[in-house]
Amino acid sequence: MRKLIIELNSLEITDTVARKMAAHLFPGVILLLWGSMGAGKTTFAKSLCAGLGANPEIVTSPTYTLVNMYPAHLSIFHVDLYRLTDPEQLDDFDREDLIAEEGLTLVEWPEYILNYLTDETVLNLLFETVSENQRRLSLESEYSEFDILFDTLEQPISSQ
Ligand SMILES: Nc1ncnc2c1ncn2[C@@H]1O[C@H](COP(=O)(O)OP(=O)(O)OP(=O)(O)O)[C@@H](O)[C@H]1O
Ligand SMILES: [Mg+2]
């Protein structure tokens, strides 16, 4: 299990870190974005999608639709399960409507999607609010596929 904590001390740093991360993602990855309201999940997702070539203006929380799809270098599914009150509501979805097997899947409020996951390469991202403009990002994954991503993000931002 590999872990890393990154202080996101400004919106600019959040943008830089998300774009750095985007450069090391690959088809089939599932990013689980944990953290409370306003912790920065969607803000991070926007920069990450921009880093993958999507238009950041179309990246908005799919709170009501549950899933948004964005064309990019990898096709991106952006899932937000905040509104889900009962995990059975997910039964209406086919697995391929929720998880981009050939692309990248981002999930906000991911608790209820855990049952859908088997052996996907999952990277956990936990966002915490430190102050009005500061967030803390904790990355965690058991998959060695993310070693380069961790190695890169371990470098101080200024030297990247
Ligand atoms: N360093 C920072 N990194 C990310 N967001 C920041 C930072 N500083 C301030 N913010 C602000 O915090 C807010 C984060 O909102 P965002 O919608 O991304 O949160 P969220 O985790 O997706 O919440 P929700 O659970 O409601 O979807 C934005 O208004 C953003 O501008
Ligand atoms: Mg959000």
Image: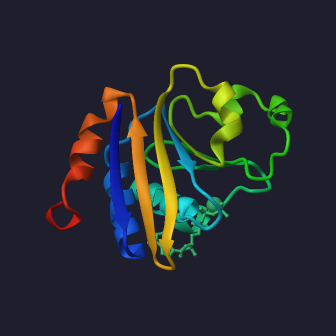
Quadrant location, the N terminus: top left
Percent x, y of residue 152:
22, 48
What residue is rendered at 78% in x and 52% in y?
Answer: 65
Q: Quadrant of residue 6?
A: bottom left
Left/right placement of residue 19 relative to residue 127 reads left
Q: Is any atom of residue 61 visible in this view? A: yes
Left/right placement of residue 102 relative to residue 144 reads right
Percent x, y of residue 7:
35, 64
What residue is rendered at 67% in x and 34% in y?
Answer: 113
What residue occupies the far left of the structure in this picture?
Answer: 159
What residue occupies the far top of the structure in this picture?
Answer: 119
Percent x, y of residue 110:
64, 42
For residue 140, above or below residue 120: below
For residue 128, above or below residue 2: below
What residue is rendered at 51% in x and 20% in y?
Answer: 119
Left/right placement of residue 34 relative to residue 150 reads right
Percent x, y of residue 96:
67, 29
For residue 1, above or below residue 75: above
Q: Considering depth in this image, is 27 or 91 the residue closer to the camera? A: 91
Quadrant location, the C terminus: bottom left
Q: Considering depth in this image, is 4 or 53 the residue closer to the camera? A: 4
For residue 63, above or below residue 109: below
